[in-house]
């Protein structure tokens, strides 16, 4: 059985690969329906459909440069059903810190919220 921390890190690696491949629709299963995302500049995106639409819009930009999220830590709650991932992100000449809240739903880890902060 895969440890929860390893499962979350594997899912993050897969999201990075899907972003690099510009496959927005395939990102949908990684988000809860009511997921929330705060962008690096402080914008708020509500709902998995809106998040996937935002990815798709970025992917259509001719100069799109894939960004990568690299986890530093993954911490679980006492029940093993929620986790906090923190790390660094880079892309398109920018970088910063991020935090993601994951929830285990029907045996699969999905993102309930993400916060990105542009620092450089």
Image (cartoon, grey):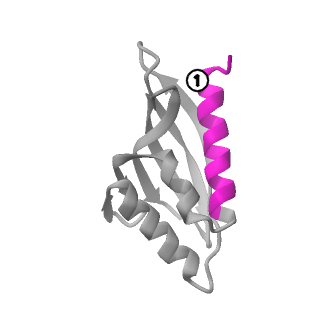
Please tell me which residue lies in front, 22 or 85: 22
The residue closer to the viewer here, 118 or 106, is 106
Q: Would you identify the image quadrant in which residue 99 lies?
A: top left
Q: Which span of residues is magenta-colored? A: 1-19
Q: Look at 65% across and 58% down and name the residue there.
A: 18
Residue displayed at 43% across by 69% down: 54
Secondary structure beneath label 1: helix
Find residue 22 and report its image quarter: bottom right
Position of the N terminus, as image quadrant, is top right
Residue 59 colored in magenta in the image: no
Say which of 100 and 54 sits in front: 54
- Relative to 100, residue 78 above or below: above
The percent position of residue 19, horizontal first and vertical second, equals 62, 62
Classify residue 3 by image quadrant. top right
Position of residue 14 in the picture relative to residue 43 (left or right): right
Residue 91 in percent (x, y) is at 62, 66
């Amino acid at each position: 059985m895969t440890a929860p921390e390893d499962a979350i890190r594997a899912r993050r690696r897969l999201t990075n690969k899907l972003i690099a491949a510009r496959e927005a629709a395939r990102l949908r299963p990684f988000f809860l329906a009511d997921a929330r995302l705060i962008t690096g500049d402080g914008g708020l995106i509500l709902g998995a459909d809106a998040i996937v639409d935002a990815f798709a819009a970025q992917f259509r930009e001719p100069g799109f440069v894939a960004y990568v999220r690299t986890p530093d830590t993954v911490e679980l709650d006492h029940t093993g059903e929620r986790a906090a991932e923190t790390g660094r992100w880079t892309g398109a000449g920018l970088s910063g810190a991020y935090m993601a809240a994951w929830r285990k739903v029907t045996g699969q880890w999905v993102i309930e919220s993400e916060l990105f902060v542009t620092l450089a």
